[in-house]
Amino acid sequence: MDKEYFRFYIKVYTALHIVPIVIPNELHTVFGDEAPPLRTVQRWSKWFRESREEVEDEERSDRPITETTSKNIRNVRNLINDNPYVTVGELEAQSGLSHGTVQRIISGHLQLKKLLHVMFPNI
């Protein structure tokens, strides 16, 4: 189920003055583990009581890319092939990816590790 549907449900129940502690129990009964946790329901219920209207997430500025897509993996691989002495910080700057994503790509997907300041296959 889409997050917006859960948030709409929370919005309606909040408008009906139903306490947030009841809402996750009902959602869990119907949707099981897909239902949002109590803390999330409490946070959204509070926002709706404070006159928030939208159920969609707000835009987040300067949010780093955290996706490990095949395109990003190819990009990091090409950057390393061009310069085996490249640092993780330089890879972050050149690719626009977050530190954690670059690390996951290097060690998990490319199976490389840094030896003597050069990227080598992880054997």
Image (spheres, rainbow, N blue to C red):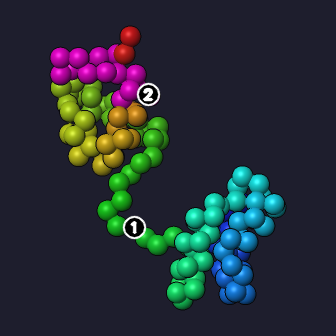
* Marks 1/2: CA–CA distance: 28 Å
Residue 91 position, x and y percent, is 25, 39
- Callout 1 environment at 10 Å: few (<14), some (14 to 19), or many (20+)? few
Q: Give the range drawn in magenta.
A: 106-121
Residue 35 position, x and y percent, is 70, 59
Residue 56 figure quarter? bottom right
Residue 46 figure quarter? bottom right
Q: Nearer the viewer, residue 45 or 110?
A: 45
Q: Residue at x 34, y 67 (%)?
A: 61
- Callout 2 environment at 10 Å: few (<14), some (14 to 19), or many (20+)? few
Can residue 53 be seen at all in this image of the molecule? no
Which residue type carries mark 2? Gly
Disc 2, SS: helix
Q: Can you tell which mark lies on residue 108?
A: 2
Q: Which of 60 and 18 is in front in this view?
A: 18
Q: Residue at x 68, y 71 (%)?
A: 21
Q: Nearer the viewer, residue 34 or 55?
A: 34
37 within the magenta span? no
Q: Can you tell which mark lies on residue 72?
A: none
Residue 6 position, x and y percent, is 68, 68
Horizontal placement of 83 versus 37: left or right? left
Residue 73 figure quarter? top left
Using the image, determine if residue 75 lies above or below residue 41: above
Residue 39 position, x and y percent, is 58, 64
Disc 1, SS: loop
Which residue type carries mark 1? Arg
Horizontal placement of 88 versus 75: left or right? left
Q: Quadrant of the N terminus?
A: bottom right
Q: Residue tagged by mark 1? A: 60
